[in-house]
Image: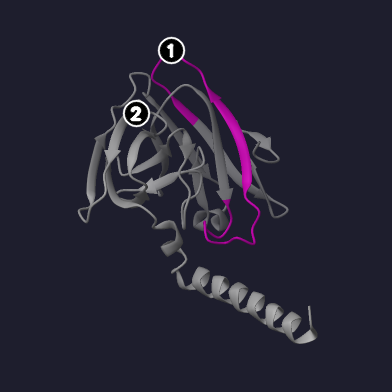
Amino acid sequence: MSPVQKNSLLLLCNLVVWAINFMTFSGTLTLFAKKGQPVRIETTPPRTRLSINGTLWSGPGIINGWIQSPARIYLIPGQHKITLERPGYIPHSFKALVTEGDIEMQLSSDLEISPEANNTVEISVMDQELQASTFILDQGLEVTQPPLLAQDVTPGVHILEVRLGGEDNLRSKPFLCTFTIPSGGNSTYKISASLKNGRIQASNCQRLRKLK
C-alpha cells in the first residue's frame, strides 16, 4: 500500500470515528437502532423494566432495562417475547407478533401489585447536603422525596443507591448498600442516611462495594 493510500485510509477512519462521536452527542445515533418496526409501549405503573426475548432492553438513555412509559422501541419483524417487571409487582410476559408496515404497533400492560408488596421503606436524611442527592431502589426506582418513601415493596433483598448531587453527577461514585425485608407482615423498614467525613453512611443497610 502506497503512502497516499495509507493516508487516505487513515483519513477515512478518522472521519468515521468523528461521525459516530458527533451522532452520539447529537442523539442521531439512535437511527442505527431503528432497524425494524416502531413499537409503542405503555405501562401502568409508568416506570418498568423491559426484556425482549429474555434480554434486558438497552439503548440511548436506558439503564438496566428501565423504560419510562410511553416508550418507543424498534423490533425486527417476527414473534417476540416481551417481559415487563417492577419490584412489588407481578411480572407480565406476553408474545407479540411484529409485522412489516408503516403503522406503529401499540402495546399496553397494567402490572398487578404483588400480594406480598405491603411494606414501606422510609429513609431519613440526617445531613442537609444529602437532601439534593438521588436515592434509587433496585437499580431503577427513584425514591420519592420529600419525604423519602418507597411503597409497595416486597420481602427479600433490595439494593439502595445514593448519588451525591443527583443522578446526573457522573463524577460522584454512587454509594451502594443492601437490606433485607423479612416476610410475613405489613411493616416499615427504616434507613437513616448521613455523611461522615464526606462519605455516605446508612443504618440498617450493608455497604456494597460494587454491583455483581
Q: Residue furthest top?
A: 184
Q: Nearer the viewer, residue 127 or 184?
A: 184
Disc 1 element:
loop
Please provide percent x and percent y for residue 140. Answer: 47, 43
Residue beneath the point at 68% across and 41% down: 210
Quadrant of residue 170 within the rendered picture: bottom right
Labels 2 and 1: the sequence-earlier one: 2
Label for residue 29? none
Residue beneath the point at 43% across and 34% down: 53
Depicted 14 relative to depicted 48: above or below: below
Q: Nearer the viewer, residue 108 or 89?
A: 108
Q: Which residues are magenta?
A: 163-189
Label the magenta part by its dominant secondary structure. loop
Quadrant of residue 171 within the rendered picture: bottom right
For disc 1, the neighbor class at 10 Å (few under 14, some 14 to 19, many from 20) is few
Q: CA distance from mark 2 to mark 1?
A: 27 Å
Question: Is residue 54 shown in magenta?
Answer: no
Q: Which residue is mark 2?
A: 93
Q: Tell me, yes or no, whether the two marked residues, 2 and 1, touch with CB atoms within 8 Å.
A: no
Depicted 95 relative to depicted 45: above or below: above
Residue beneath the point at 39% across and 55% down: 35
Q: As shown in the figure, which amino acid type bears the numbered disc 1?
A: Gly
Question: How many numbered badges does the structure rendering display?
Answer: 2
